[in-house]
Amino acid sequence: MKTLTVHRRRRRATASRDLRARAAAQAERARPVGRSRGLRAALALPALLLFLPAPASPQAPELVFISNITATSGGSGPLTTIEEQTKAVLDALGERLGTRGLGYGDVVAMNVFLRDSRHFQAMNGVYRGYFAENPPTRATLEADLPERDALVQISAVATPAETEVISPPGLQSPSLPYSWGIRAGEVLFIAGATSRDPETYQPVGGDVQTQTRRVFGNIGMVLAEAGMDYGDLVACKVFLDDVRLWGDMNTAYREFVTAEDPPARAAVRGGLMNPDFLVEIQCVAERSDERRVVLREGQRLGRSPLSPAIATGERVWLSGMLARGEDAEAEARATLARLGATLEAAGLGFGDVVDVWVYLTDVRDAETVLGVLAEVLPEGVPTTVAGLPLVGRLGVEIQMTAVVR
């Protein structure tokens, strides 16, 4: 009998023999087997929002988004080391979770941004003490941070719903404090995946196409263990070591996503923690019989392998969007026009948005962009802001998630 790892309300997901066989094939071939279907003042705004799909169900778990937590000072003065700031940031996370009756064990996904990648090991030393068992999925990147003195910034997703830790038997457990996948109802959060050998956890080198295929091979194993496949991916974030690799990454990426309804996506430059890696991909999957692509009036799928938005019946996952403008403010307004039209096509509006990500080529534009967002979004919508340079010459990209109430 297979032994299950139990932690609080989490348990390892099981999959059918067929799904496990497919996972093994993915590890061997790294090819898809999915189905064919279809500033400070601004940053000080409340960063926590709980949305409650009604009625709550296993298919529509409650989710809590928490964003842009930094800590640069404490009771005794400035916090100047990565250890001090990481502890203070995670303590603040615990406090915000506590206001919703949640704890660290309810966190399903984390994004950690470091000002300097050389702080990675020291950050992990503190982080591990907060997530000793069955830690959340995670992606860690070097980025420019809006808070001038911040060394670390985090955003998180948590849920009071029952969750399952997904640990594929053919995928070596990470030595770092994160889980490969965590599932809540029909929503699966997948850790930022890099090009690692599934049996040894060692880096697999090669060009960006080779690494992208290995990344998706590992993602496929997590999906299969959760009873899903590539066709269930709804949103991905692609972090490239060099934005000039975008085209070659796309060539391999499109081999794995469904052509008629690829997941929503954002692709930016992010400083990866291991110099051996050229790409890291973090995804969310959601199984739904109501899945559909959302297109603005007259719009068609473009050449890039992404949908403007994927609607699942419970929520809408939008791609990172951008638009031309003479400056950051103009770009933000033009981008919001596209996002607003996409939301309208889904029967929603900005009042239904529950999570926002802002990617900036120049993080000094943060206050300006946040001011534009404040004009259309409800007060307190969690908004992650990071200096992660865009593909191309534009400076502002905005990605959203909305809920069908």
Image (cartoon, rainbow, N blue to C red):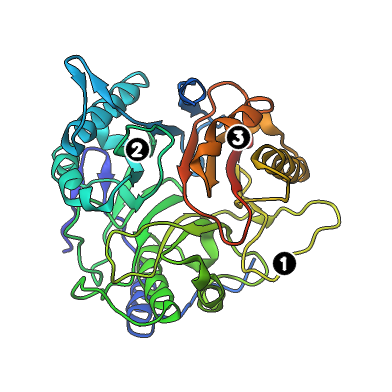
- Residue type (three-letter) at the residue carrying disc 1: Gly
- First-in-chain label (1 vs 3): 1
Q: Which one is in front in this view, the residue at disc 1 or the one at disc 3?
A: 3
Left or right relative to 155: residue 404: right
- Front in this rendered view, residue 285 or 72: 72
Residue 261 figure quarter:
bottom right
Exactly how many numbered labels are in the figure? 3
Residue drawn at x 77%, y 40% as measured from the top left: 344
Q: Position of residue 204 (x, y in %)?
A: 28, 78
Residue tagged 3: 369
Residue drawn at x 27%, y 26% as measured from the top left: 94
On-image quarter of the N terminus: bottom left
Question: How far is disc 1 from disc 3 in space, using C-alphas?
Answer: 26 Å
Q: Is residue 360 above or below residue 130?
A: below
> Element at badge 1?
loop
User: Is the residue under label 1 in contact with that under label 2 (CB below 8 Å)?
Assistant: no
Residue drawn at x 44%, y 35% as measured from the top left: 146
- Residue type (three-letter) at the residue carrying disc 3: Val
Residue 100 figure quarter:
top left
Question: How far is disc 2 from disc 1 in space, using C-alphas?
Answer: 34 Å
Residue tagged 2: 153
User: Is the residue under label 3 in contact with that under label 1 (CB below 8 Å)?
Assistant: no
Q: Which one is in front in this view, the residue at disc 2 or the one at disc 1?
A: 2
> Element at badge 3?
helix
* Residue 103 visible, this angle: no
On-image quarter of the C terminus: top right
Q: Position of residue 267 (x, y in %)?
A: 53, 59
Residue tagged 1: 302
Q: Is residue 120 above or below residue 193?
A: above
- Residue type (three-letter) at the residue carrying disc 2: Gln
